[in-house]
Amino acid sequence: MRKLPLLIPLVILAFSSIVVNSQETSSPNTYTQSVKREVLANGYPTQDQKQILELVRYTIAPRTKLPTHTHPGMQIERVEAGTLTYTVVEGEAKVTKANGTELILQKGKTTQLTVGDSLVESAGMLHYAENQTNKPIILLSASLFNANQPKAILASPEKR
């Protein structure tokens, strides 16, 4: 059996702390049961280690809503399985559909992302996503984040 580096459980805890299960319970494991974050590869692109580049596989459980949040850098995703309902709260996101059609998702707009669709999120863009289906969603994600910040930063209550 392959041993996982200590970093992976810490990263999973960091991301899963922002996840809200749409069927809220008091279970201490609700968050980690809703989204699984697997770091497939990572590294520091410069000697000063101020940024971290990561390749991650997210598995989002059925009927799960992620809270409104931003990221401390650019993130790109590709849907590998399922249908993700994605909403921009502030800023804009670039969506490329599986057929090559590109669109800019503006503030207040929601779209459905399906297998083969991709998404580009810039740093600080406020958004949330949901799995409104009964099947898990799998996303492949690459990010270039500030290394000393959380992977996701929750929005202030008035912006949620």
Image (cartoon, helix red, strand yellow):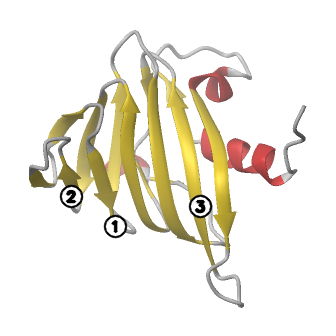
Residue 88 vs residue 3: left or right? Answer: left
Question: Residue 33, relative to residue 149: is it above or below?
Answer: above
The residue under the point 71% across, 90% down is 47
Q: Which comes sooner in the sequence, label 3 or label 1?
A: 3
Residue 129 vs residue 153: left or right? Answer: left
Number of disc labels: 3
- Per the rendering, the mark at residue 27 is none
- Rounded to the nearest whole Å, what is the CA distance between mark 2 and mark 3? 20 Å
- Rounded to the nearest whole Å, what is the CA distance between mark 2 and mark 1? 9 Å
| Image-quadrant location for residue 36 | top right
Q: Secondary structure at mark 3?
A: strand
Q: Which residue is mark 2?
A: 94
Q: Quadrant of the C terminus?
A: top left
- Rounded to the nearest whole Å, what is the CA distance between mark 3 and mark 1? 15 Å
Q: Which residue is mark 1?
A: 122
Q: Which comes sooner in the sequence, label 2 or label 1?
A: 2
Structural crowding at the residue carrying mark 1, measured as other residues with C-alpha within 10 Å and reported as few (<14), some (14–19) or many (≥20): some
Residue 105 vs residue 20: left or right? Answer: left
Q: Is residue 160 visible?
A: no
Q: Secondary structure at mark 1?
A: loop
Q: Which residue is mark 3?
A: 54
Q: What's under tag 3, amino acid-wise?
A: Glu
Give the label, 2 or 1, closer to the camera. 2
Q: Position of residue 103 (x, y in %)?
A: 10, 54
Q: Position of residue 10 (x, y in %)?
A: 78, 49
Question: Residue 123, relative to residue 50: is it above or below?
Answer: above
Q: What's under tag 1, amino acid-wise?
A: Ser
> Which residue in the rendered view is the most extreme toward the bottom?
47
Q: Position of residue 140 (x, y in %)?
A: 47, 44
Q: Nearer the viewer, residue 150 or 131?
A: 131
Q: Nearer the viewer, residue 37 or 79?
A: 79
Q: Position of residue 72 (x, y in %)?
A: 50, 68
